[in-house]
Image (spheres, grey):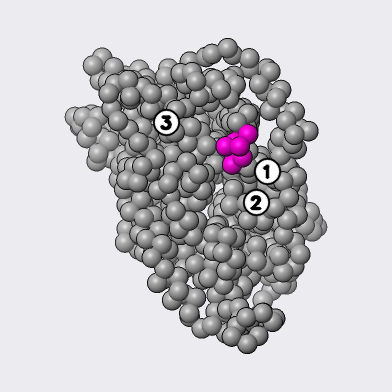
Amino acid sequence: MTTGLTEDAPADGTPEADPRPQKNRRRGTGRGAGPRPPLRYRIITVSLLAVAALYFLTPVYWLAVSATKSSSDLFGTFGFWFHDPRPLDRLRQVLTHDDGIYVRWFLNSLLYAGVGALVATLLSAAAGYALAVYRFPGREAVFNVVLAGVLIPGTALALPLYLLFSELGLANTYAAVLIPSVVSPFGVYLCRIYAAAAVPGSLLEAARIDGAGETRIFTTLGLRLMTPALVTVFLFQFVHIWNNFFLPLVMLSDSDLYPVQLGLTSWQGYADRQPELYQYTVGGALLSVLPLMVLMGVLQRYWRTGLTEGSVKA
Amino acid sequence: MKRPTRTEIRGARAAAGFLLPFLALFLFCFIAPIGYALYESVLKTERTGALGLGGETREVWAGFSNYAHALEDDRFTTGFGRVLLFGAVQIPLMIAFATALALLLEAASARWVGFFRTAFFLPYGVPGVIASILWGFLYVPGISPLVELADAAGWEVDFLGRSAVLWSIANIVTWQFTGYNMLVLIAQLKAVPGELYEAARIDGASAWQVARHIKLPLIRPALVLTTVFSLIGTLQLFAEPKVLKPLSNSIDSGYTPNLAAYNEAFTSNNQHIAAAEAVLLALVACVLSFGFLRLVGQRGRDGEDR
């Protein structure tokens, strides 16, 4: 299996494929300018796409509409239309409820995802580079173990990790979420196949002859040549940590340490007793989703490198 | 074998330095928990007092009794069957949906592509928990405009009923990940040289034939990978049933294997059985994903890149 993944790598070929999409796009428009399919087909195509778009966007639309409502209006008025919209008031209430705990959760999320993804990227870069550039005994064995790590369900690890961390007194700390977040076997995999193709051995040889040390070669040459892969690793890991629910749920009991997702579920859980929490949950959900959705919208245009390899991430 | 040269020794030393930080943390966060779970899973807690009452508790060897307990527990095995059924239905549907969207986007005129691609991909930016909260509101009668519209049309719908709730969860997962899988497939489609389509078209192939006989076989690797990782994701199903549980009586504490393990550890306070269940879950995930990859013949040449 492991070899199956590697086998794909050159085909999806990161670095050589890099300039290709552009060429293809140009070719693509050329294709479109050629004999166009009949109008009938074009109408069917666009209609099907429009129906799909309706499916994907409706819940988001509902969320945006509902975030402007009070709890009683959430229940009492039609969900797909506005009623007494007071978006700014509602959002202010979300942000100030319980001494602004929401803001704290949001910052926690940023901390976990930002710092976690940054460290994960650096560690993956170093390990992937080492696996690609140097020959040493056990190299393939190490790589295969790391690849197996990609296939292990993260939630199956979280529970034993919690048991282990509580033995060590690490449970219910920032570190409990941060430490597991900086390990990205997928990142190592991506960095290795990228570095194998993007870092030419002759360049390294030349740098060595010039008297540069291995660390210096890595930090000046390696990291720069691997930048596209590093961006991808960072983004994947950021989204992965931001979306991770099971790990913080298991590790954290102090609500001051919660990331935003966990906080919102705790609000949702209390909403039976405190109806205004329905409104805060909806508003908070919208706020928490906005930054990432904007990021998605911008990124999906550029986020091509490594996406095929990216299919490695569930 | 010849003796390693000086460069090779220097290289091995540098490689060790670069690998060490990652490997140390990998051992700590991946290997150690697996070992610890195995260790915990063969122990049980026993009270030292007479008749097993009072006194100190201590850990004693339990052999495979925790595994036996987990496998004899109907709720746990039913939960396993449930996620397998879920995967058998939801994964093919989602991958087919994603493939259809990718091919349609390829065929659509350029002006619309950007908007649609963004719209389809957007839900990937919504974390599973938030997606579940969001769809939960759209499922609950009284707040959901969907239920209201269905009522007005004279349909009786119960998204959270015993038979429907699993597929309501499937809908949440499909909503979230179709666009992502689509983007992966598009990336692979873009890597196909345009001449290939050109040649087929000149040979008189219809758009449908090009899709069926050229594009589909070429994106096979991406299809295989998206399937495998959907499979792993499915086995880990947790956030959706956890969030919907308060809204639906049909979701019990062992609705999915993960939920069962979580509840064993945190509600029943039985970490030994929870550990056994986590081990079983990881085992099944590995067997299924390796098995699937073998089945589709992804065993390849050696992993040597250079």
Q: Are marks 1 and 3 on the same chain?
A: no
Please, is residue B10 above or below residue A237 in the view?
A: below
Q: Quadrant of residue B98?
A: top left
Q: Secondary structure at mark 2?
A: helix
Please, is residue A178 above or below residue B191 in the view?
A: below
The disc label shown at residue A259, or none: 1
Please, is residue A240 above or below residue A53 in the view?
A: below
Q: Position of residue B96 (x, y in %)?
A: 32, 40
Q: Secondary structure at mark 1?
A: loop
State the extent of the magenta-drawn residues as a range. A268-274
The disc label shown at residue A313, or none: none
User: In which quadrant of the rendered image does the N terminus of chain B lie?
Assistant: bottom right
User: In this image, A64 relative to B255: left or right?
Assistant: right
**Disc 3 to disc 2, how far (Cα)?**
31 Å
User: In this image, A219 relative to B244: left or right?
Assistant: right
| Relative depth, front residue between A195 and B32 | B32
